[in-house]
């Protein structure tokens, strides 16, 4: 089937299902290392020649890594760039910068190495479920291989130097994407998120900084990159994430015991609308998909494959819809096509 | 199937589908004649003996009519009485009066003759679609047969005498139950209804006086019973009803041409919720059923039998649900059972 093929071709590693614990709440884990090349200016102040030099230096470094492919931003259509953002493989910023920027991708799209984003190099590993250690291990190995041929900007006192002071030191940003519908339904979410930010962690929406928390999906990441080791940063995030998971599980238990009728009703209505609507906005779709997933996770709704959620939150984004239908779509048409894709996926 | 059998057993004539024109908009036509027995006091001021006398006199009169069965209000459970109201066979008032009141019903439930309601006799004929003349013909024949043995309270100057002055003269109330979703969606409804009341007609909700206009269903009836002949009353109501139907059809045409996506979406979402919800209030159900029916009428939604609408607006009422499940249900359980019945009917 055309749509199924399209999805399989366009899936990233993190969108796969995993049997690891907590993967009903933790959609994905991400590790990102920011690095810069010594003696070359940061991209924001660099001229074209210097940016080209960055690109070349990294290309040389990448020769030690197998199965990576370089996508130059200049060579991509707007839709292709958008889909990379929608799959969380590149940052929205990389689309806007048009200066010899690009991304190295491995085959299963678990690793993406952005070139000339805010820093010269941003190595990113995204895996399904709660799997920060494995992600860091992969990122660290790549980092070592790159460092073998590239002279990174590094200070003995501070650590890795980065364009923005918030990344200086380890250059590490670790984050988890969590789905917390029960905490939202039981109105516990604000209390929890306030506590999280007091623990030195940042909470963002599904598409990072400045993006809304749609579909009860939040990204939680470390704010501090300096003065803590990589292991400490990851441990801290993991510990807090496990506490959040516990709270979410408790809220789910509460809902099952005290509010089962209304949760089941909410989940089935979401299914009813999603599998029948003729037009649907991205925002509404995410919200309904969230409550349907809660129903599936709580075994109140059956007959739906668990991977529907990650697949649909990605392929119903504007870039993907336009790529799927092969041309630019206005908002109205996108809403109709989005509804079509959702109906088709849920039918199976 | 249990539910299907229950519905077939409990259907009234007007709930059947008809091929007559306009039956997509006009759900039913009703004729009601108010009569009283000469020399016996009106029920509101009558003592038990006198009410008994009324009952007996009518019983005697009914012997000329075949296939009628008498249901005494005293002999019915609360649920049975409620279902009679919900099928529009008796008035809500008849439930509350507990004075030798009852109803004579014919086999297909097209005719109901209430005894000791506000008047001694209220003969009512309800038929599917726009069919006021046929309804009046049937009511008039019954009235003649009753009058052959019963001395009706009648004044040469005024006509038939009734307990309430608003019924004096012909004692005729003719009404149509119309479904006007397109006039509601295009926000024309208030303008139309204001015009209707200026033409001497009354507009009421689905369950008559004082009831809300739920599910975009309205009852339109004559206000004047005096100074016009029966034929004039019926002609006037029919003429205005046809104008309302025209306006509704024009609004449907407008929606199809200018707003097809949103109407189709509204109808399919209604279907999605109705066929999946686990709990639903009577009010929401009526509203969604209305938009689903609009989608079916406009051929935007297919695979649904047209009779779903009249069946479901009746059998999802509290009395019917309680009769179906055999015992009293609280609101929460009723909402769950209502959702169950709707899911089952729409599945077919």
Image (cartoon, coloured by chain):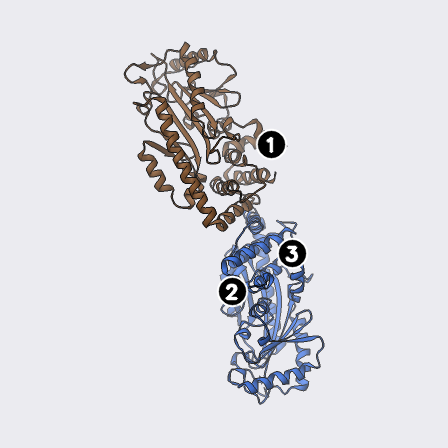
Chain colours: A brown, B blue
| Residue sitting at x 53%, y 72% | B200
Q: What whole-number distance in Å separates the C-alpha atoms at marks 1 and 3?
A: 35 Å
For this view, does A148 lie left or right of residue B264? left
Q: Nearer the viewer, residue B24 or A261?
A: A261
The residue that label 1 is drawn on is: A4
Instruction: Give the distance between the C-alpha atoms of the residues marked 2 and 3, in whole angstroms.
Output: 26 Å
Label 3 crowding class (10 Å Cα cut-off): few <14, some 14-19, many 20+? some
Q: In which quarter of the image is the C terminus of chain A?
A: top right
Mark 1 crowdedness (10 Å alpha carbons): few <14, some 14-19, many ≥20: few
* Residues tagged by mark 1 and mark 2 found on one chain of the structure: no
| Mark 2, residue position | B193
**Residue name at image x 46 percent, y 22 percent:** A112
Mark in the foreground, 1 or 3: 1
Residue reaching furthest to the bottom:
B39
- From the image, tell me which residue sits under label 3: B306
Residue A201 appears in view: yes
> Label 3 marks which chain's residue?
B
């Amino acid at each position: 089937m055309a749509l199924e093929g399209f999805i399989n071709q366009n899936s990233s590693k993190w969108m796969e299902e995993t049997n690891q614990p907590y993967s009903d709440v933790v959609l994905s884990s991400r590790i990102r290392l920011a690095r810069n090349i010594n003696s070359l200016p940061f991209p924001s102040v660099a001229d074209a020649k210097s940016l080209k030099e960055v690109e070349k230096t990294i290309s040389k470094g990448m020769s030690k890594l197998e199965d990576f492919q370089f996508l130059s931003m200049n060579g991509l259509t707007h839709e292709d760039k958008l889909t990379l953002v929608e799959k969380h493989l590149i940052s929205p910023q990389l689309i806007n910068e048009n200066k010899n920027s690009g991304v190295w991708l491995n085959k299963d799209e678990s690793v993406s190495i952005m070139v000339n984003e805010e820093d010269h190099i941003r190595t990113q590993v995204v895996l399904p479920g709660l799997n920060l250690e494995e992600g860091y291990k992969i990122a660290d190995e790549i980092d070592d291989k790159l460092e073998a041929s590239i002279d990174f900007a590094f200070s003995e006192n501070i650590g890795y130097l980065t364009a923005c002071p918030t990344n200086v030191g380890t250059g590490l940003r670790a984050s988890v994407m969590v789905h917390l519908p029960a905490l939202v339904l039981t109105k516990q979410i604000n209390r929890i998120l306030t506590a999280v930010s007091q623990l030195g962690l940042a909470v963002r929406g599904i598409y990072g900084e400045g993006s809304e928390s749609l579909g009860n999906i939040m990204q939680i990441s470390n704010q501090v990159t300096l003065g803590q080791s990589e292991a400490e940063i990851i441990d801290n995030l993991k510990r807090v994430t496990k506490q959040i998971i516990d709270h979410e599980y408790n809220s789910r238990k509460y809902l099952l015991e005290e509010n089962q009728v209304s949760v089941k009703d909410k989940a089935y209505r979401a299914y009813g609308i999603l599998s029948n609507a003729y037009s649907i906005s991205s925002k509404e779709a995410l919200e309904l998909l969230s409550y349907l997933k809660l129903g599936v996770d709580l075994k109140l709704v059956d007959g739906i494959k668990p991977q529907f959620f990650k697949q649909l939150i990605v392929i119903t984004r504007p870039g993907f819809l336009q790529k799927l239908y092969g041309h630019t779509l206005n908002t109205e048409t996108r809403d109709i096509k989005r509804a079509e894709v959702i109906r088709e996926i849920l039918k199976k």
